[in-house]
Amino acid sequence: MKYQSQAVALPYFVAAIGLFVGQILFGLVMGLQYVVGDFLFPEIPFNVARMVHTNLLIVWLLFGFMGAAYYLVPEESETELYCPRLALALFWVFLAAGALTILGYLLVDYATLAKYTGNDVLATMGREFLEQPLLTKIGIVVVALAFLFNITMTVLKGRKTSITVVLLLGLWGLAIFFLFSFYNPTNLVLDKFYWWWVVHLWVEGVWELIMAALLAFVLIKVTGVDREVIDKWLYVIIALALVTGIIGTGHHYYWIGAPGYWQWWGSIFSALEPIPFFAMTVFAFNMVNRRRREHPNKAAVLWALGTGVMAFLGAGVWGFLHTLAPVNYYTHGSQITAAHGHMAFYGAYVMVVITIISYAMPILRGRACNSRKAQVLEMWSFWLMTIAMVFITLFLTAAGILQVWLQRISDSPMPFMAVQGQVSLFYWLREISGVIFLIGLIAYLVSFFVKDGDKPATT
Amino acid sequence: MSGTFTKAMARNIFYGGTVFFFLLFLALTFDTTNALPKTDNRQNITPAVAAGKHIWETRNCIGCHTLLGEGAYYAPELGNVYVRRGPEFIKAWIVSQPTGAPGRRQMPNFHLSDEEIDQLIAFLKYTSEIGNQNWPPNIEG
């Protein structure tokens, strides 16, 4: 590693991977509860497992983004981090806050948790993905601001590159749009309208800037392609992402009480949202094909290419499947949504964080890349997890199509729970795919500990 | 990417496009804000509805159910449950949970008082009357 302070990224990456494991375990619990309804009831009801599953995902991705920023920014800015000790202190604060929140979900009744964490003063809890107690939300803002201060100061005192500028824009946007999580009017339509300013403008907006910046950084490093070329692609991709994605928010406003014209705005602009993801795929393959060096870290290159493909499939194709208003009228809030959510989050954000970890972790551990044996195992984990996720998505899509047909289209619509019984075969198949995913994840963990006489290649 | 299309041009398209479309989004938001009173049923937001929404949130109902199609997909849509089942059924259902039927999905008992259940039902009634382009397609949600 070029700068000593990049080392603070290491604990962030370790925490990210640890919480990722927790997320998958709770995912498997929920998957089983879909078919064995009383599994772990009343100890861990479905809603608690889901809260843990989704909140762990958000927290570990944030750990990943922060770790990535601490690794990337000093190297890009060609200067040490403004304050490494602050970064390390924030790590423990964020980890403690995250752990306490998850333990709160698991050990304390949710209404009681709300009562003792100030929800009666300012009610923000009990909304999907924003279930965190008020104190946790305030903690997230404090950590985010201190983190942004540290990163911004580093960029200001060093070299400014397109990658750091785009990354900073994305990270600042992340913090700013999170502030809408504190706005929770009684009017349900307004509540939902601005809830999407956090959720949609994160994942289909500013997070794409972060993702594109991380991908661009890794591609520069592993391909040696000229920075001018990479930067140009970067700006084109994020321009496409925001031009389509901002008005694309409209695809969430079809059926929540907003004016009917959102069906037009939402359908047209969100139909274009696959384009930036497609550009990202072309970008990754194009840069790797034009590479000017053979980087010895083959696993990182594989993850970078995989991110492009899977983000396009999950966010792009599976998003497009149900984004047009006349289609969404039937698919809204069905297993189709769940299918899309899984592959999009995995393909875009999980994989880009693993890409940067795969590239940076060996360097943080004092070598250019891992041994061949470790890399082979990591690549096995790539294929196991990725193929398992493809099948999870396919089975949920099949369940969703059947669900929509039986419950919403057929001449004699069936009640929700009756339909759930009809499609349970696909839930079982999803759960089996989930176990395969876990096996892939275990292989990924083991790859960090593979000791081998086979010397790592040097560059 | 030919030589005539420069990085500066790409960067300008990004900044220009983002600012333009964000301003357009704000304009649409402004228009929506003005139009919402016609559809969002705000005239029926009573103290009971507000209390009901608070109960809805603090019991994490969204962790299993959808409301106007948003939430978890484990249990039935509740945006139109007031119309589908009616207040008496909803009340009887809530107090009789969990069913304890082996292998079936279980809903916790939240030990709500009669008044709290009435407030929750008032919230669900208000929600069912929001003008939302006639979604869901049929009564089953």
Image (cartoon, rainbow, N blue to C red):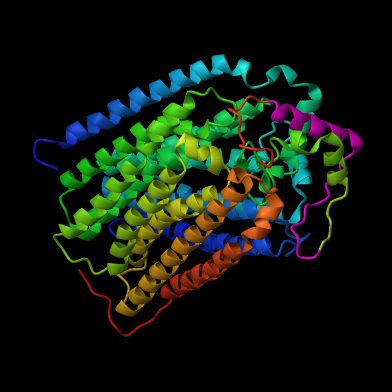
In the picture as drawn, the residue positioned furthest to the bottom comes out as: A453
Q: Is residue A97 magenta?
A: no
Write the residue at 52% across / 68% down: A433
Res. A76 in view: yes
Residue B117 location in percent, x, y? 85, 36
Residue A25 location in percent, x, y? 59, 65
In the picture as drawn, the residue positioned furthest to the right comes out as: B114
Res. A84 in view: no
Magenta residues span B102-129
Q: Is residue A156 left or right of residue A322?
A: left
Quarter occupied by the C terminus of chain B: top right
Residue A436 location in percent, x, y? 50, 71
Seen from the viewer's position, the closer of residues A328 and B63 is A328
Write the residue at 55% across / 29% down: A194
* Residue A362 versus residue A344 in the image, above or below: below
* Residue A26 versus residue A452 in the image, above or below: above
Q: Is residue A291 left or right of residue A46?
A: left
Seen from the viewer's position, the closer of residues A143 and B128 is B128
Residue A176 location in percent, x, y? 48, 32
